[in-house]
Amino acid sequence: MFLNASAWTLIGFALAWVVGWAVFAPGRITYHRVMGAILLYLAIGLTFVALNTFVALAAPDAFSSMSVADSPAFNSTMIYYSFGTLTGAGGDITPVHPMARSLSNVEAILGQLYPATLLARLVTLEIEDEAKS
Amino acid sequence: MARGEESSLDRLRLQLRDPLLTLLTLLLVFWMFVLAPLHASAVINTDIIGFILALAVTGALLILSARPGAVTSPCFLPSDFPRQLPGLGCVNHRMSTCFSTRAPGR
């Protein structure tokens, strides 16, 4: 499971890096680049799935209402928790361990600031570019 | 490779770069929010679909990054991965046969 979490961390960072370069490269902002920015948001969530898995593996009681097990259901639960935290929707799973709480705070801050700043800026630029052409 | 061929490849990459972002977004959404729950609840066996999606994501990343190293990213996946998310374990199994640097038994 540590290997799985490591793999997902690497995949998440690689995806964020490559897509970040493509989205924020110089040039006209198109609809596709806005979609790429949404992909970057999803990649952030995916990376936090892996990081939260690390915390859950190190401290099995780090999250309430969640049992750590080597199964596809656990990964699905982690995706649910990570995107619930990222979007601010919350849910029935709560972080209990200080490290899990800290990580969730970082994720929630990123999840609120990224759409409000970078994504909004990209959409504005896309509208401006559309109006010019 | 001749300079002309390189420039046409670069042009093709630049043409494909932006639409690939949309394609990757749709693929990832389908993968995480449709395929993974179906696999977790064991409704259907999604290994083949997951494998095709993993190949598509890897190919798209390769084109986006323009670096051949991007294709090696599935090699990091451990061999018991099909039980975690559909498809990627198959990629790992196939890739591990290509690279001798991996430890046996993983």
Image (cartoon, rainbow, N blue to C red):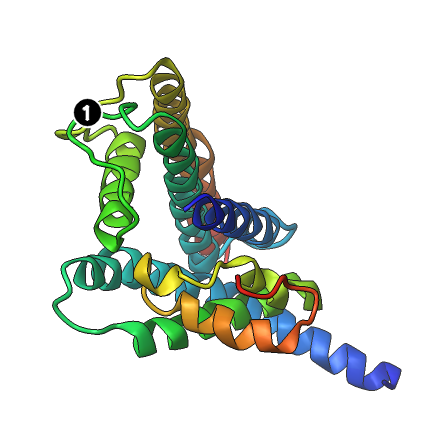
The answer for which chain carries disc 1 is: A
Residue B28 in percent (x, y) is at 36, 59
Residue A73 in percent (x, y) is at 21, 50
Image quarter (top left, top right, bottom left or bottom right) of the N terminus of chain B? bottom right
Residue in the image at 21% along x and 63% along y: B39
Left or right, B5 with respect to B92, comes to right
Please tell me which residue lies in front, B45 or A11.
Answer: B45
Residue B65 in percent (x, y) is at 64, 61
Residue in the image at 38% along x and 34% along y: A57
Q: Residue furthest front?
A: B105
Please tell me which residue lies in front, A12 or B13.
Answer: A12
Q: Residues within 10 Å of mark 1 (few under 14, many from 20)?
A: few
Left or right, B97 with respect to A76, comes to right
Image position of B78 with respect to B93: above or below? above
Specify whether residue B75 is in view: yes
Residue in the image at 31% along x and 73% along y: B47
Q: Which residue is mark 1?
A: A64
Image position of A39 with respect to A65: above or below? below
Image position of A111 with respect to A31: above or below? above
Left or right, A91 with respect to B67, comes to left
Specify whether residue B67 is in view: no
Residue B31 in percent (x, y) is at 31, 62
Residue in the image at 54% along x and 64% along y: B105
Please tell me which residue lies in front, A116 or B47.
Answer: B47
